[in-house]
Image (cartoon, rainbow, N blue to C red):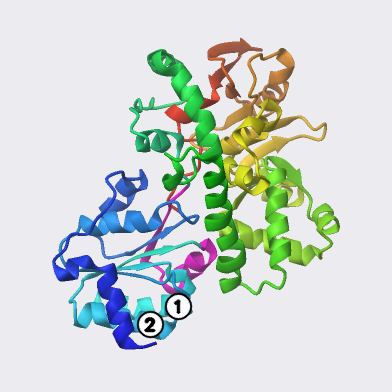
Amino acid sequence: MNNEYLIRLIHEYNPQLAGRPIEVAEFRRDLYREIEPWIAKKQAIAIVGLRRTGKTTLMRQLMSGMEPGTLFFSFDEEETQKKEVLVFVIDYAINVVHATSIFLDEIHYVEDWEGVLKRYYDQKHCKFILSGSESLEISKAKATLAGRLVTFQLDILSFPEYLRLKGAAVPEAPDAVWDFVALERQYNTCLVQKEYYEHEFLEYLYKGAFPELVREDDSTVIRRYIADLVVRKIIYRDIPAIFDIRRRDLLYDLFRFACSTTSGLFDIQNLSRTLNASHETVTSYLFFIRTAFLIRVAEPYSRSPAKRMRRHKKVYVAHPSIACAVLGYDRTQLIEPVLGPYVETLFAGKFFWRDKEKNEVDVVVESPTLIPIEIKYQNRISPADTKSLRLFMKMHKVGKAVLITKNIFLRRSLDGNEILLIPAWFALLCHSWQSPATY
């Protein structure tokens, strides 16, 4: 590639080189505070996550808060995704700009980028801040950059982040989900705006994964944005750029199937027959979709890793809004039978529980203590709705559990155990049910 063109690109990406300020969004994701302490340390920082979740914006914000001596470059354009371009950009940053901190966006597109960075990291003592939309490529780099790279995952917007981005005040979360007194006090405070939170919860479910859609009301725009700028770019461009994909149509059909069956058990053999593809192809394609952050997979809870491997798993789309866009759902189609699996998707974790009699607990959280969570997005809760929770609690000697409801908040004692019934909107508002963002 022509070096003059690259120099022009570098200066377009870096207005500070011409004395102009770096324009950044005022709203900051929660992850910003987690990354900030690592800026002063020598380790390289990698930010990974789904497309359009704000990785580039976060990098710009980190960059604007640093001392002079920074440089940014993006490898999102196909013609720049070459090793020699990466080398030129780093050399230019060090020798011409005298940058001490170099921000490299969408670095995963460049072959052997980790080897290049290792050399400059060791010899030039540069600070690198990276981003990528492909978790596998970043994870593989850890072997080459052992001890030199700390990785953070920028997830989809949380419900509190979604509300803050809309300008709403978000109450401070209680320290522990089991502190019912604190939860009740917080719930009573939120009751004044209960209808607002309930409405925004459904809006969050329909469009809340992506910052640029928070203030968008047009359903057609929302669906096109997610389907075209996120899903199709990942399926037809990002994944094939890294992996050998012979059937992109199958890749898309597989993801569409995941959208239509989110929160459900899946069997590779049945999927293979349904999609008329080999077991190996379906397994590989599921793995590719997962590493691109489009789906999450939960394993059946067991203390035996071998048992977890043998049993059927659950697949979840990354966020309900993505499924709505891919399946073409309008807001009016989000009736209660449809909402149940989507609400469960918002709480999905690493594990669920299911016994031989098909009794099932939707989510099992291991840390800090074992927490079984059942999702019943409805206004009435019968004893039958708590059966699986009670069985799990008895089997695993757990004294407390959570039942996510549509509109019920109370503490119920059953068989000497305690079950907290919490409305979905309030549960997401006051507690993070996802795994930690750093790995």
Check residue 234 in the rendering and tell me which mark sits there, or answer none: none
Please say if the residues under marks 2 and 1 sit with CB atoms less than 8 Å apart.
yes
Front-most of residues 306 and 246:
246
Check residue 81 in the rendering and tell me which mark sits there, or answer none: 1
Magenta stretch holds residue 171? no
Classify residue 25 as left or right of residue 256. Answer: left
Percent x, y for residue 365?
Answer: 56, 36
Percent x, y for residue 65?
Answer: 20, 55
Residue 311 seen in this snapshot: yes
Q: Quadrant of residue 74?
A: bottom left
What residue do we see at 74% from left, 35% from top?
354
Tag 2 residue? 85
What residue do we see at 42% from left, 70% from top?
107
Which residue is at the far bottom? Answer: 2
Percent x, y for residue 368?
Answer: 48, 35
Residue 122 seen in this snapshot: no
What residue do we see at 42% from left, 78% from top?
80
Front-most of residues 391 and 431:
431
Classify residue 412 as left or right of residue 210. Answer: right
Front-most of residues 318 and 268:
318
Q: Mark 2 to mark 1: distance in Å? A: 7 Å
Type of residue at label 1?
Answer: Gln
First to last magenta residue range: 134-155
